[in-house]
Structure formats: structure tokens, C-alpha cells
Image (cartoon, rainbow, N blue to C red):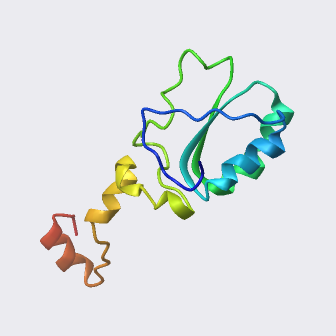
């Protein structure tokens, strides 16, 4: 199941031993993801999982009981969120709101006389 990228609607269900280490190992088998969602309240479990799973994701969405009724859907792209991922995730930054605009812009620095540049670009002397 980790050799093919299947776009939904689909869900993969498989057994695991309940440990954060094995859950993170399953994430790593995907060789890179845009986003993973984890639903848990156990801080110790989450801490172990997040440290091990984060390198394989562009974003990890943590849903606890406290925010479960307010959270965005899994994988939803928001302008304020980092989007894109490592490895086989293939970037994905073009969907990342303001950050995605970087593909359509070019940075440039213009150095010169402040008065002249101010008159050209409308800034005061």
C-alpha cells in the first residue's frame, strides 16, 4: 500500500500495536507526505509520535478532544499553514496560500540614490 499513491475517496486500515514508534514507522514507509493527521490526547504518546513522524511530513495536524469539534478537515490547505512535503510528497507548495505565490514572484533589490528612487516609487525624500 505504500508503493502507490491513491487519491480518494479511500481509506487504508491496517493493524498496529498502538505504540507511537510503530505509528511513526508506518508514516515513514510512505517516504514523504504533504500532511498527516493524528487524533490523540496522550501527551507522551503524541510527543514521541511527532518527533518521529515530523521529518516525513510537510505538516502534521494534531486533533485532541479539546479541539475535535473545531478542527479543519484532514489535509485542508490554509493560507497561513505550511504546505508541501518531503520526499515523494513532491513539494505541493503551489497550494500553500501566500507562500504559494512565491512561484509567481521575483525578488529584486534596487540600490541607489534615495531621493531619486523616492521620486520614482512615490516615497518621500
What residue do we see at 26% from left, 77% from top?
Answer: 114
- Give the image quarter of residue 77: top left
Outermost residue toward the bottom in this view: 112
Q: Is residue 52 left or right of residue 123?
A: right
Outermost residue toward the top in this view: 69
Q: Is residue 3 above or below residue 77?
A: below
Q: Is residue 89 left or right of residue 115?
A: right
Could you tell me residue 31's position as x and y percent? Answer: 61, 59
Q: Is residue 51 left or right of residue 111?
A: right
In this rendered view, identify the residue nearer to me: 14 or 44: 14
Q: Is residue 12 above or below residue 33?
A: above
Could you tell me residue 84's position as x and y percent? Answer: 48, 55
Q: Is residue 49 above or below residue 93?
A: above
Could you tell me residue 102's position as x and y percent? Answer: 34, 62
What residue do we see at 78% from left, 36% from top?
Answer: 16
Query: In which quadrant will I find the C terminus?
Result: bottom left
- Give the image quarter of residue 55: bottom right
What residue do we see at 63% from left, 32% from top?
Answer: 13
Q: Is residue 84 left or right of residue 32?
A: left
Could you tell me residue 75's position as x and y percent? Answer: 48, 38
In this rendered view, identify the residue nearer to me: 80 or 69: 69
What residue do we see at 32% from left, 72% from top?
Answer: 107
Amino acid at each position: 500500500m505504500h508503493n502507490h499513491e491513491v487519491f480518494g475517496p479511500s481509506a487504508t486500515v491496517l493493524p498496529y500495536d498502538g505504540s507511537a514508534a510503530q505509528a511513526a514507522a508506518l508514516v515513514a514507509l510512505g517516504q514523504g507526505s504533504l500532511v498527516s493527521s493524528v487524533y490523540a490526547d496522550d501527551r507522551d504518546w503524541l510527543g514521541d509520535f511527532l518527533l518521529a513522524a515530523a521529518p516525513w511530513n510537510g505538516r502534521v495536524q494534531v486533533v485532541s478532544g479539546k479541539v475535535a469539534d473545531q478542527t479543519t478537515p484532514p489535509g485542508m490547505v490554509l493560507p497561513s499553514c505550511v504546505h508541501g512535503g518531503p520526499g515523494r510528497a513532491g513539494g505541493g507548495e503551489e497550494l500553500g496560500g501566500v507562500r504559494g505565490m512565491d512561484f509567481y514572484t521575483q525578488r529584486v533589490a534596487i540600490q541607489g540614490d534615495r531621493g531619486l528612487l523616492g521620486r520614482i516609487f512615490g516615497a518621500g525624500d
